Image: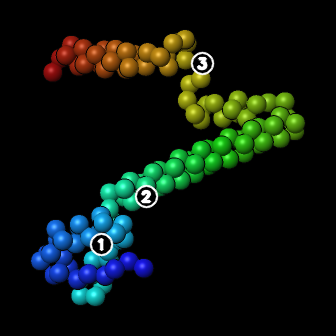
Amino acid sequence: MAKKIPITMLKKDAAKIVREVVRSGEAWTVTDRSRPVAVIVDFETFMAMQRRLGERDESEKKTLSEAKRRQIRALSQQWLEETDVYPWELMKDLVGCVNSGIPDLARNSQKYVMEMIRAKAEKRRRRPG
């Protein structure tokens, strides 16, 4: 169980309390009006907690991503068994222009966007006004 210390005591004896936390390896709970507001732990414990949280986050992300991939594969396979049309062919018009006529659009989209912006700006300059 973590030791409890009022915030007023922490203000008075911070250095002493930190040394005790480091020496004992015990967590101390800081209270304000008897309510817990913070926890003091030694650096090694803190880093271990961070690593565990990071590992958990990464494993959850991978697990969730993999689950989504499996679902998409299963739905696509089921769809193909029932029809001979790929699902994305039915919605390509909703997603955007699949056949843009520009073969390297994905790689050079910034270049094409900048060209479009420059062309529109040039049209505005030429407009009588």
State the residue position of label 3. 99
Question: Which residue in the structure is indicated by mark 2?
Answer: 49
Is disc 1 in contact with disc 2, using a CB cutoff of under 8 Å? no
Looking at the rendered image, the quarter that the N terminus falls into is bottom left
Disc 3 and disc 2: Cα gap in Å?
A: 50 Å
Frontmost of labels 1 and 3 is: 1
Position of residue 105 in the picture relative to residue 14 (left or right): right
Q: Is residue 2 above or below residue 101?
A: below
Q: Earlier in the sequence, mark 1 or mark 2?
A: 1
Among numbered discs 3 and 2, the one appearing first in the sequence: 2
Q: Position of residue 101 (x, y in %)?
A: 55, 12
Name the residue located 83 percent from the left edge and 41 percent from the top edge: 78
**Dot in front, 3 or 2:** 2
> Can you give x and y, in whole percent of width and height, for residue 81 in the image?
87, 36
Q: Identify which residue is drawn at 58% across, 33% down.
A: 95
**Residue kind at label 3, given as amino acid type:** Asn
Where is residue 26 shown, x and y percent of the image? 36, 71
Left or right? Give the position of 74 relative to 117: right
Q: In this rendered view, identify the residue nearer to me: 23 or 30.
A: 23
Foreground residue, 54 or 3?
Answer: 3
Q: How much space separates mark 1 and mark 2, taking CA atoms?
A: 15 Å
How many residues crowd around disc 2 within 10 Å: few (fewer than 14), some, or many (20 or more)?
Answer: few
Label 3 sits on a secondary structure element that is loop
Which residue matches tag 1? 38
